[in-house]
Image: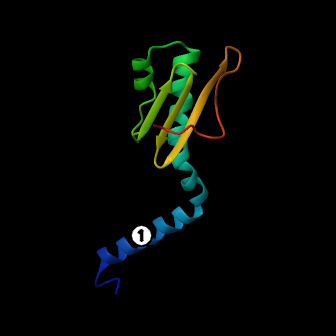
Amino acid sequence: MIARRPIRSLLVLALVLLAATAWQNRTYLAAFPGIISAYTAKEYCSCRYVMDNAADYCQGYVKQYVPTSGFLDDAERKRVTASGLGRSSTAAWLGPRQGCQLLPEADPLP
């Protein structure tokens, strides 16, 4: 079979190897969606409220290849909520000595 269909055999082998690698790294792959929203919320909060940069600059600073699906900058409460890949995260400015911190529960997006 391999001699008669070498391309198909290589594709099947590559697919099996890819599936085995994905299975070995399933914990890391499951954590990936949360990283997108957490990174965006935390870094934007730090850029905006710790470093006192303009909102437009901070939007460009946190831009990633994987886009976010929702974003809210609550300037009054100094909280930032971002969502992407089905997960949401909120970061809040705690003060000049503590900076921004991710909160255990994300605020709802409007």
Q: How many marks?
A: 1
Which quadrant holds the C terminus? top left
Q: Is residue 1 left or right of residue 92?
A: left
Write the residue at 39% across / 19% down: 56
Image position, residue 54 (x, y; %): 44, 14
Q: Which residue was labeled with disc 1?
A: 15
Name the foreground residue: 103 vs 58: 103
Per the image, label 1 sits on a secondary structure element best described as helix
Q: Quadrant of residue 68?
A: top left
Question: Which color mode does the image show?
Answer: rainbow
Write the residue at 63% across / 41% down: 105
Q: Is residue 4 above or below residue 66?
A: below
Q: Is residue 57 above or below residue 68?
A: above
Name the foreground residue: 36 vs 87: 87
Image position, residue 62 (x, y; %): 46, 29
Q: Amino acid at mark 1?
A: Leu
Write the residue at 54% across / 55% down: 29
Which quadrant holds the N terminus? bottom left
Name the foreground residue: 25 vs 63: 63
Q: Is residue 46 above or below residue 66?
A: above
Rate crowding at label 1 as few (under 14), some (14 to 19) or many (20 or more) other CA atoms within 10 Å: few
Q: Identify the residue at the far bottom of this view.
A: 1
Q: Quadrant of residue 99?
A: top right
Q: Quadrant of residue 15?
A: bottom left
Name the foreground residue: 14 vs 22: 22
Write the residue at 55% across / 24% down: 45
